[in-house]
Structure formats: structure tokens, C-alpha cells
């Protein structure tokens, strides 16, 4: 009786974590991040109570090594407590072990359809904010337009994880996932994630989607149609996106950018690179990284701090490479590389079952998506995307398997 009750509670917590992670990122923001942290604590208690043997695996070792490098680098500058910002990286290990307990042959299909629902929910929220409420940009709840857009884009592409192995004609509906995700990005007015989308698609074509290039081309057509349908609801967003062409032309022809948002990012890249070159090994510390980079700006960052500036009170350098490099130097960049490598290594080193392609697909979406989104905005080091990335990686590598690991596999380095 008690065992059955605990089993039902465990199944409920698993479904709750899966649903929250795959459906609510656009609508959950920071609240979702903290809720997932609480759920993770409960799952850890469940693992301990069940006396489950924990498997670390290649991905787990990557996350551990990344956290250790960050902690060492930050400690050198008296910033050891700031490593707590990355502590959830360690949660991957109990999470992947928990989800592997509930692995089943149709797990990837479940993940695909739930992520697709999450993308639809994101689109409905974005359309409501822009077309009905009249907001200039869709931003979800308890988040900001860029972070919310990045989450919707990732969810859209995660709708495809089961596609390579599915045989049902309904699988073609999942191709709408990335298109709808891109529509949400457009409604958010966020231009950075638009750069990541074609790269993710190309990476999938070179890996798990090689036999499906025609479907990827069809996806491109669907994206154009989705844009044509959604953008008329948001004329202000369309104007913002049109300025992207002007920004690219200015950068290529003059090396400067007049548009404030893109110009600020260029300034961050120049200043951040200069700061890194002057302290390449251990950086300046997480809490000092922004001020340290500002010292390399002509006005020492006074324009950004001025009253009325959109960047007043800015807390990051708008690029993961810069934030990690300036805060922790080469050690930080190595940690960043390990974080991005973890899902890929875990997927490629995992057992070759029927869901192997699904794990590879999910890993490519996460690693490539977070890297390219992180070129124009911070992804790691704050609660929302750090928690979301780790949770999604654990779901892809632990839940999307044909069966829970056999005892013999538990002592192997499988992902």
C-alpha cells in the first residue's frame, strides 16, 4: 500500500516536472525556475528514499567539471558565493537518474507532443499580449522579451525530437513546432534568436535529420507562411525586425552601428574582448565583470548608466562568451564549453536504442540553440535559462530511452 502510494506520488512529480518544463517556459519565467528547483529537491528526496544508485555519466561529469572550474575562478577574486548562480548544473545528476526510472519506448513521442503544446501555448500568449493588449513586444510572464523568445524557440525545435523515428503521418504536424516558435520570436521583437534558428536547422540536417532534408525545406516554407500570418498582428514588431537589415549593412560597410540596441552589443563585444585580453586566465570575478568591461569603453560606461538609458542598471554583457570570459577567464570559457558539450556527449555516448536519434536531436537543439542565442544575450548564470537548460537536458538524456538502465549499464559510462 505504502509502496504503491509512493509510486503514484513519484509518477505525479515526474509528470509535473515534464509538463512545467516543456509547456510553461514562456509563461513561467523566474517563477517556473524556482518551482523546478523545489521539485528537484523533492525528486532528490525520492531518490534517496528509494536508495537508488546514482549514475553520473559523461554529461554529468561535464556539468561537475564546469561548476568546479567556475567555483575556483570566482574564489580567486573573493566571489565564491557567486558560484551559487551555477549550482543547478549539479542538479542534472539526480534529475537524469530520476527520469531514467520512468523511461519507456514512447518517451520521445511524449516529449515531442508536450513540447509542441508548449509552443502553441507560447504563441497564444504572445498573440494576446501584442494583438489584444497592445504591447509593443511579447514577453510572457515573469520574464523579458528575449529570454521568453529564446525559450519558445527551443521548445519549437524540441517538438522534433521524435520525428526521425516516428512512422505516423501525424509526425508532419510536429514540423509546425519550429515555425510557431519562430513566430513567437517575431512577436517578441527579439532579433538574436532569429540568428539561432537557421543554424539549429542546419545542425539537424547534418546529424539526425540527414534523410529528411526535404522536410526541413518544407519547414522553411512553413516558417515563411507563419511569419506572413502572424506579423500583421504586430506592426510595431515588424518595424523593429526590418531595422535588422540596416544594422547588418552598417556593420559590414562602416564597422559601426547607429541603432542603440545593436550598437550597445557591439560596444559590449569590443569592451569585453579588451577586458579578457588584459586578464585572460581567471578574469575579474562574476560581480565585477560588467564594471571591469566598462573601463574599456571610451566613456567608462557613463552613457549606459545615464538616467533614461535603457541599459541603466545593466547586470551582464549580453553574451555568454563575454560574461564567462570576463568573469572567469580561460577557466570560465572552458566551463562554458563543458556546459554546452554535456548534452551532446551524453547523447552520442548513450545506448543505441530506438530513441538514440531522439536524444541526439534534443542535444543538438539544446547545445546549438543555447550557444547561438547566447551570442547576443546572457543564457547561463541566472535562474531561468540555467534551470531550464539542465532540466531539458535531463529529460532528453534520461527520459527518452527505451527502458530504465539495466544493472549492468549502471556501472558503465552511458549518458
Image (cartoon, rainbow, N blue to C red):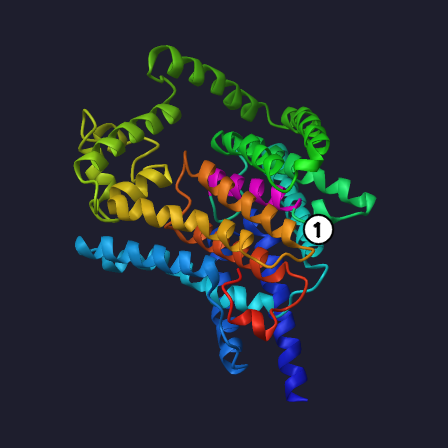
Which one is in front, 387 or 237? 387
**In which quadrant will I find the N terminus?**
bottom right
- On screen, residue 231 above or below 63: above
- On screen, residue 323 above or below 9: above
Left or right of 150 in this view: 89? left
Q: Residue furthest bottom?
A: 1
Location of residue 228 in the rendering, given as x and y in whole percent from the top left corner: 68, 24
Query: How dense is the environment of label 1, judged by Cα within 10 Å: few (below 14), some, or many (20 and up)?
Result: many
Look at the numbered disc 1 and give the secondary structure of its residue: helix
Whether residue 135 can be seen here: no
Magenta residues, dominant SS class:
helix
Report which quarter residue 218 is drawn in.
top right
Q: Residue at x 33, y 26 (%)?
A: 266
Report which quarter residue 135 is drawn in.
top right
Asked whether 147 falls inside the magenta stretch, the response is: yes
Which one is in front, 149 or 347? 347
Location of residue 132 in the rendering, given as x and y in whole percent from the top left corner: 63, 35
Q: Which residue is mark 1?
A: 113
Which one is in front, 303 or 113? 113
Q: Which residues are magenta?
A: 144-160
Location of residue 369 in the rendering, given as x and y in whole percent from the top left corner: 51, 40
Location of residue 356 in the rendering, given as x and y in whole percent from the top left corner: 63, 53
Asked whether 84 falls inside the magenta stretch, the response is: no
- On screen, residue 12 above or below 181: below
Amino acid at each position: 500500500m505504502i509502496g504503491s502510494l509512493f509510486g503514484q506520488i513519484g509518477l505525479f512529480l515526474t509528470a509535473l516536472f515534464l509538463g512545467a518544463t516543456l509547456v510553461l517556459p514562456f509563461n513561467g519565467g523566474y517563477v517556473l525556475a524556482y518551482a523546478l528547483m523545489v521539485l528537484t529537491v523533492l525528486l532528490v528526496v525520492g531518490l534517496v528514499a528509494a536508495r537508488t544508485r546514482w549514475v553520473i555519466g559523461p554529461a554529468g561529469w561535464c556539468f561537475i567539471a564546469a561548476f568546479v572550474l567556475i567555483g575556483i575562478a570566482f574564489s580567486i577574486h573573493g566571489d565564491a558565493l557567486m558560484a551559487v548562480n551555477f549550482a543547478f548544473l549539479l542538479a542534472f545528476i539526480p534529475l537524469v537518474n530520476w527520469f531514467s526510472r520512468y523511461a519507456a519506448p514512447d518517451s520521445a513521442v511524449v516529449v515531442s507532443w508536450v513540447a509542441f503544446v508548449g509552443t502553441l501555448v507560447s504563441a497564444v500568449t504572445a498573440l494576446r499580449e501584442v494583438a489584444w493588449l497592445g504591447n509593443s513586444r511579447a514577453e510572457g510572464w515573469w520574464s523579458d522579451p528575449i529570454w521568453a523568445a529564446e525559450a519558445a524557440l527551443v521548445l519549437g525545435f524540441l517538438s522534433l525530437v521524435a520525428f526521425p523515428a516516428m512512422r505516423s503521418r501525424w509526425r508532419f504536424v510536429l514540423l509546425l513546432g519550429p515555425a510557431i516558435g519562430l513566430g513567437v520570436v517575431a512577436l517578441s521583437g527579439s532579433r538574436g534568436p532569429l540568428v539561432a534558428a537557421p543554424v539549429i536547422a542546419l545542425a539537424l540536417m547534418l546529424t539526425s535529420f540527414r534523410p529528411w532534408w526535404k522536410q526541413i525545406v518544407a519547414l522553411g516554407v512553413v516558417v515563411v507562411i507563419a511569419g506572413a500570418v502572424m506579423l500583421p498582428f504586430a506592426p510595431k514588431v515588424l518595424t523593429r525586425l526590418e531595422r535588422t537589415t540596416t544594422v547588418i549593412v552598417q556593420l559590414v560597410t562602416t564597422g559601426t552601428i547607429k541603432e542603440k540596441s545593436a550598437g550597445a552589443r557591439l560596444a559590449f563585444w569590443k569592451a569585453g574582448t579588451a577586458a579578457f585580453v588584459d586578464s585572460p586566465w581567471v578574469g575579474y570575478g562574476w560581480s565585477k565583470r560588467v564594471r571591469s568591461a566598462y573601463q574599456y569603453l571610451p566613456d567608462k560606461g557613463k552613457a549606459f548608466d545615464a538616467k533614461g538609458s535603457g541599459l541603466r542598471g545593466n547586470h551582464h554583457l549580453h553574451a555568454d562568451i563575454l560574461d564567462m570570459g570576463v568573469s572567469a577567464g580561460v577557466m570560465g570559457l572552458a566551463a562554458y564549453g563543458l556546459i554546452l558539450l554535456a548534452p551532446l556527449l551524453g547523447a552520442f555516448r548513450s545506448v543505441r536504442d530506438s530513441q538514440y536519434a531522439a536524444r541526439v536531436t534534443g542535444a543538438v537543439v539544446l547545445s546549438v540553440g543555447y550557444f547561438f542565442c547566447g551570442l547576443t544575450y546572457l543564457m547561463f548564470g541566472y535562474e531561468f535559462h540555467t534551470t531550464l537548460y539542465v532540466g531539458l537536458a535531463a529529460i532528453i538524456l534520461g527520459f527518452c530511452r527505451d527502458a530504465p538502465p539495466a544493472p549492468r549499464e549502471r556501472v558503465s559510462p552511458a549518458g
